[in-house]
Image (cartoon, rainbow, N blue to C red):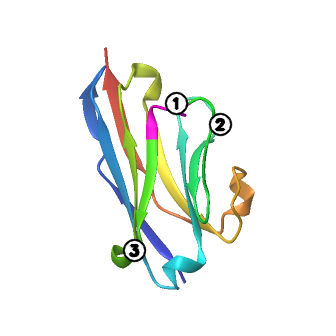
Amino acid sequence: QVQLVESGGGLVQAGDSVRLSCVSSGGTFTDYNVAWFRQAPGKERAWLATIGWLTIYADSVKGRFTISRDNAKNTVTLQMNNLTPEDTAVYYCAAGRRLSGVQDQYDYWGQGTQVTVSS
């Protein structure tokens, strides 16, 4: 059973950068594609990026967010730059067997970490 734990969220100001981490335990980390999603207040959960044998991004964050992974540390990070209040959300990492932007394709989820961006 794969367990995922996110960290790195907090309260930041517009224009700041934040680096989120997702640490995996259980299972074989390299068997999984890992994605980041976010859910803003009153909105549905939205896919941001996935890393596997390819790295793919949602158009909304391409060029501003960077996903990376360190297989030796079972960790995936999401570097987020030039944040705006619209980036305020709970950020989740998820692991699945398919390289996908669809949340139903992901079997394991972390508990989420809150990022709040003040103007």
Region rendered in magenta: 61-65
- Give SS at disc 1: loop
Structural distance between the alpha carbons of marks 2 and 3: 28 Å
- Give SS at disc 3: loop
In the rendered structure, find residue 74 and report the number of the disc placed on it: 3
Dot placed on the residue nearer the N-terminal end, 1 or 3: 1
How far across and how far down the image is residue 34, in percent?
55, 62
- At 30% from the left edge and 21% from the top edge, which residue is drawn? 15
**Residue 97 or 13: which is nearer the viewer?**
97
Q: Quadrant of residue 97?
A: bottom right
Q: Is residue 32 left or right of residue 67?
A: right
How far across and how far down the image is residue 68, in percent?
43, 56
- At 66% from the left edge and 63% from the top edge, which residue is drawn? 106
**Residue 87 or 33: which is nearer the viewer?**
33
Q: Are marks 1 and 3 in contact (CB under 8 Å)?
A: no
Residue lying farthest front? 54
Q: Amino acid at mark 2?
A: Glu
Q: Amino acid at mark 1?
A: Pro
Q: Is residue 27 above or below residue 49?
A: below
Circle 2 residue = 44
- At 33% from the left edge and 26% from the top edge, which residue is drawn? 117
27 inside magenta stretch? no
How far across and how far down the image is residue 95, in percent?
58, 66
Q: Is residue 4 left or right of residue 1?
A: left
In the rendered structure, find residue 117 and report the number of the disc placed on it: none
- Give SS at disc 2: loop
Q: Is residue 2 above or below residue 114?
A: below
Structural distance between the alpha carbons of marks 2 and 1: 8 Å
Circle 1 residue = 41
